[in-house]
Amino acid sequence: MSAAEDPVLHPETLAVRAGYEPAEASNAAKPPIYMTSTFAYASARQAKDIHQAYFDGTGPEVGRPGHIYARLGHPNLDMVETRLAALDGAEAAAVFNSGMATHSAIALAHLRPGDSMVFSRPIYGGTNGLYTGLMPEFGVHAATFADGCDRADMMAAAERALASGPLKLILIESPANPTGAIVDIAMVVELADAIGVRTGVRPLVVIDNTLLGPLMQRPIALGVDLCLTSLTKYCGGHSDLLAGGVSGRAALIQPLRLLRTTLGSHLDPYTSWLLLRSMETVHLRAERAMENARHVAEFLRDHPKVAGITYLGFLAEGTPERRVYDRQCRAAGSTFSFAVTGGEPEAFRFLDALRLLRFAVSLGGSETLITHPATTTHYAILPEERLAGGITDATLRLSVGIEHVDDLIADLSRALDAI
Ligand SMILES: Cc1ncc(COP(=O)(O)O)c(C=O)c1O
């Protein structure tokens, strides 16, 4: 039995074992990189059968590891897809060359002119651009909601969307980048079911699970249809590759793989290999980063020049957000935002005084990264929409890495003194 098929293995074990068996490649303990763009057929008959299996899902080659051309799929891609599906607890996964390529494929697969969709705010700037910039040009209308723990707020957004066309997709980002805003996953699934019964069209529920990743939040078990992760972040883990993945039922994943073939957005063999390697240690990096994050968050919370902090570990007992967090998140993660006292000038002075922390977009790397969302990652979002999502000119996003925490706190402390 392969590691991916064994239901008793823990995620930490699956992260190391799922997706590769040495017997598949000359008993090499670690997977080779299949650096080829095309695959030789064994015979004319087999060529036809492989194409039938790929495009129609029928015939004698179904379930066999045959390949055609690397854009359609290749062994290193199979490995990361199997590992991601195992970690997410899903039937299947499709891996793309970025998180945004994954978001775009889902949008193109499920939305047609006249349809509507709903998404939660705040949302990553690129995703916002996809649904408020590009998709409206194809006749798809988007409505948004900001309180992910309030059914009435979500339903009001759904009604606005339904007024303009069939509601086909509900996309949530939870916890949200950069504020950590939480959306009640089970509530969204229930709402989608209710809309399906009422209108005859059940919207697909998609979550962007990037901020916590597959080990800290397992949305498939909570009923979402598709779980998307920017693998560039925690799974890649070293800020040296871009990738994205989506997991779910095989019947939903296979059309996305076929669309990926048309879009040409597959992940190449070398990056797939790097990613598979990084996934082996994602839990170790995440544990250390989360331990550091708690100390850094405590330091910032108590600092007089910090006006507020969104670290999930500080959610107050008895609040709806805390109840939802306890139900659906396994840990607080290591990316959060905080606001310095003042506005953009103070935030800029603070950033320019940092010496150790890297001022760069992205998150989930081994090194600590800090950014100013209003002028970088969320630059293209309208100011009023940014504010509605809780992002001010004083907001800074911190992705805590695995360095020694005392060095991180010393750098933050020095920079706060410089404001
Ligand atoms: C929450 C979230 N989703 C999706 C993306 C897009 O991922 P990628 O940069 O891999 O395209 C990002 C990138 O920062 C993100 O933060």
Image (tube, helix red, strand yellow):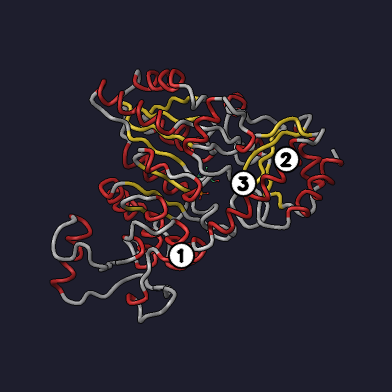
Quadrant placement of the N terminus: bottom left
The residue carrying mark 2 is 298
Write the residue at 37% across / 64% down. 19
The tag earlier along the polypeptide, 3 or 2, is 2
The spot of residue 283 in percent (x, y) is 53, 56
Q: Decide: marks 3, 2 in contact (CB < 8 A)?
A: no
Kind of residue at badge 3: Ser
Circle 1 packing at 10 Å, graded few (<14), some (14-19), many (20+), is some
The residue carrying mark 3 is 334
Relative to 364, 203 lies left or right: left
Residue 194 higher or lower than 41, as above or below: above
The spot of residue 28 in percent (x, y) is 41, 79
The spot of residue 247 in percent (x, y) is 37, 49
Using the numbered discs, state the Cα–Cα distance from disc 2 to disc 1 in whole angstroms.
Answer: 33 Å
The residue carrying mark 1 is 16
The tag earlier along the polypeptide, 1 or 3, is 1
Relative to 249, 125 lies left or right: right
Kind of residue at badge 1: Val
* Secondary element at image label 1: helix
* Secondary element at image label 3: loop
Write the residue at 32% across / 55% down. 261
